[in-house]
Image (spheres, helix red, strand yellow):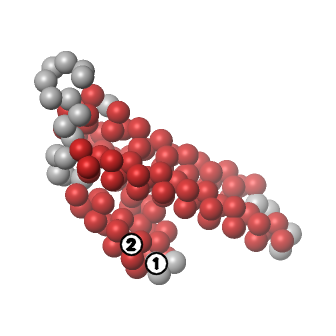
Amino acid sequence: MQFVRLLPVILSGVLVGAHFLRNQQWLAVAITAAVLGVLPLRRKWVAYLAQGGLVLAGLEWTGTAMQLVQYRQSMGLAWTRLALILGGVALVTLLSALVFRLRPLRRRYGFIVGPEDG
């Protein structure tokens, strides 16, 4: 069940990893793979690392969208659909960081020790 809860994080990570791979940004690919690789560890720093990575990935998608929209506008090409798609990808990536607020994942990563929420 934890895998299902982490699915948005995993899919966002794989998607941004593919983006980096396409652009031959090998260090970013390796970092993305490493972050995905530590998700099974039950440590607070893993959740913080994943959330930070997702925020950075969302910013990467936003920057990419802005670059591509500018390029397409300068060429006189349609850009609205591109902006909507990449804007949606950026939003989903950013929202994926919120799965760590779910009680089962807070418990898994050590933010909740007992049955109480504190």
Instruction: From the viewer's perspective, tell me whether residue 40 is left or right of residue 73.
Output: left
Please state the horizontal and vertical placement of residue 29, each as a whole percent of the image.
38, 72
Q: How many labels does the image show?
A: 2
Who is closer to the viewer here, 76 or 32? 32
Instruction: Name the residue: 35% across, 33% down.
Output: 101
Instruction: Bin the neighbour count of mark 1 within 10 Å (Cα to Cα): few under 14, some 14-19, many 20 and up.
Output: few
Report which residue position mark 1 lands on.
Answer: 25
User: Residue 29 shows which numbered tag?
Assistant: 2
Q: In this view, does 111 lie above or below 40?
A: above
Instruction: From the viewer's perspective, tell me whether residue 61 is left or right of residue 76.
Output: left
Compute the Cα span from label 2 to label 1: 6 Å
Q: What element carries label 2?
A: helix
> Residue placed farthest to the top in the image?
116
User: Residue 97 shows which numbered tag?
Assistant: none
In the image, what residue type sits under mark 2?
Val
Please state the horizontal and vertical placement of residue 56, each as a whole percent of the image.
48, 57
Quick check: can you spot residue 57? yes
Instruction: Name the residue: 36% across, 65% down.
Output: 32
Quick check: can you spot residue 1? no
Disc 2 + disc 1, Cβ < 8 Å: yes
Instruction: From the viewer's perspective, tell me whether residue 54 is left or right of residue 23.
Output: left
Instruction: Name the residue: 59% across, 48% down.
Output: 88
Q: In this view, does 2 lie above or below 28?
A: above
Image quarter where the C terminus lies is top left
In the image, what residue type sits under mark 1?
Gln
Q: What is the quadrant of residue 16 in the picture?
A: bottom left
Please state the horizontal and vertical placement of residue 42, each as a whole percent of the image.
16, 46
Who is closer to the viewer here, 8 or 112? 112
Instruction: Bin the neighbour count of mark 2 within 10 Å (Cα to Cα): few under 14, some 14-19, many 20 and up.
Output: many
Please state the horizontal and vertical placement of residue 21, each as a whole percent of the image.
44, 75
